[in-house]
Image (cartoon, grey):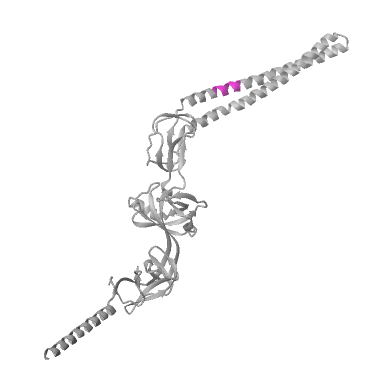
Amino acid sequence: MANKPKRKFGKIVIGIVVLLLVGLGAYTELTRKTPVQTAVASKGTIYQYIDERARTTLPHVYHITMPENGRIQPIVLTAGTAVKKGQVLATLDKADLENAMEESHDIVDAMMNAVKASVAQIKASQANVDFSEWLWEAQKKLYSKEQTSELVEKKARKDFLESKVELEQNHADSYSMQALYSATKLLPLYVGRRLKRTDVKSPVQGVILKRYVWNEKVMQAGDPLLDIGNLDAMRVTADVLTEEAVSIQVGDSVSIRGEAIGDTPVRGTVTQVKPQGFTKLSSLGVEQQRVPVIIDFQPDDLAILKRKGRALGLEYRVRVRVFTDKQKDAVIVPRTVLFRGNSGKWQAYVVQAGKTVLVDLEIGIVNDQNAEVTKGITAGDTVIVAPESTLKDGVLVVSTNG
């Protein structure tokens, strides 16, 4: 009988232990905190921007070509050489043209002498006309007095008329000679113009970008010789998706960066959005409709790059960030705070008294890093960054980032 109270007491102890363990488990479950990463909503200026790859370009690349058919002499200038406006870049073989210039002067002199001879012939013809007319008049008077025959008078009249025809013919020949002389006087000008073109000169001050020919060679008119550009007019061209380009305006500020620029970005300004787009294949083979956006460097920043030894060349790769909008005194949170709720609205978790509070949001500007909240969160609120899909409203949380 003594063992029965002991067994009863043991059951009571076991029951108490079980109750304590259950209570402890329930307490632990109720007081367990879920670790989360948090951020504090701040107030400041937020920017809307478009990030895109870009390349350095020039407003004009001057393509120097053969001015006419001929033999080009060796071109000694190399890519990267600075040239001045009017500097001789290349020379064509001009021996034939120099001979043609001498011949053209001889032709002009010959035609001038021919004109002088025609003028002298006119004077002689005029004297013959005057004499023939006088003789005819004399014969007419004699014939009227029956002192000469009709035949003689008729012959004198015939000689007078023939002398007049000869005079007119000499006038016509002289006019032809003078016209030919006027035309031949242009020969030296024409040959001289061709001689001038044998010295191919730079149309601008700049740098040789590319050399197509270096050895002596017979070439056709229009064949390329050199490309020249003014690197002081360097700018940037970004091919932007058309759906993003519609928000870009002339005058928008731009941050230009990349390995070619260095650690510190430089500033630029949008100067043109081209009116026509084009189709381009992405790296994944997807067709994209893009439009070129032209960006000018701030002159001071381009000069700073040169002083740092970062002289940009043509077609260098850079990245641009075009700022299309901004909002001052905005409530700003990390973009990863936001998520779409079941209703499709933007939502976020705010931490209040150590617990999660699910809030609906209205948002403004959103970029790759941050978002503007216009309703639902105020500056100073603690928000959960990248919340797990399993997180619920009212859950105890603890920040893992202190």
- Note whether residue 329 is visible: no
- Quadrant in the rendering for residue 18: bottom left
Q: Which sits in the foreground, 157 or 333?
A: 333
Q: Which sits in the foreground, 263 or 164?
A: 263
Secondary structure character of the magenta stretch overall = helix
Q: Quadrant of the C terminus?
A: bottom left
User: Taking 269 as reference, is 20 left or right?
Assistant: left
User: Taking 401 as reference, is 104 left or right?
Assistant: right
Q: Is 392 rendered above or below residue 69?
A: below
Q: Which sits in the foreground, 164 or 353?
A: 353
Magenta residues (range) = 105-113
**Residue 376 position in % (x across, y down):** 42, 75
Q: Name the residue at 53% across, 22% down.
A: 103
Furthest residue in direction left, as rendered: 2
Decide whether residue 69 is among the magenta residues.
no
Q: Name the residue at 61% across, 25% down.
A: 181
Decide whether residue 111 is among the magenta residues.
yes
Q: Quadrant of the N terminus?
A: bottom left
- Note whether residue 21 is visible: yes
**Residue 206 position in % (x across, y down):** 42, 43
Q: Name the residue at 54% across, 30% down.
A: 190
Please state the total of marks drawn on the protein image.
0
Q: Is 342 rendered above or below residue 191?
A: below
User: Taking 402 as reference, is 280 left or right?
Assistant: right
**Residue 296 position in % (x across, y down):** 44, 53
**Residue 282 position in % (x across, y down):** 42, 51
Q: Which sits in the foreground, 349 or 251?
A: 349
User: Taking 349 as reference, is 270 left or right?
Assistant: right
Furthest residue in direction front, as rendered: 1
Furthest residue in direction right, as rendered: 145
- Quadrant in the rendering for residue 144: top right
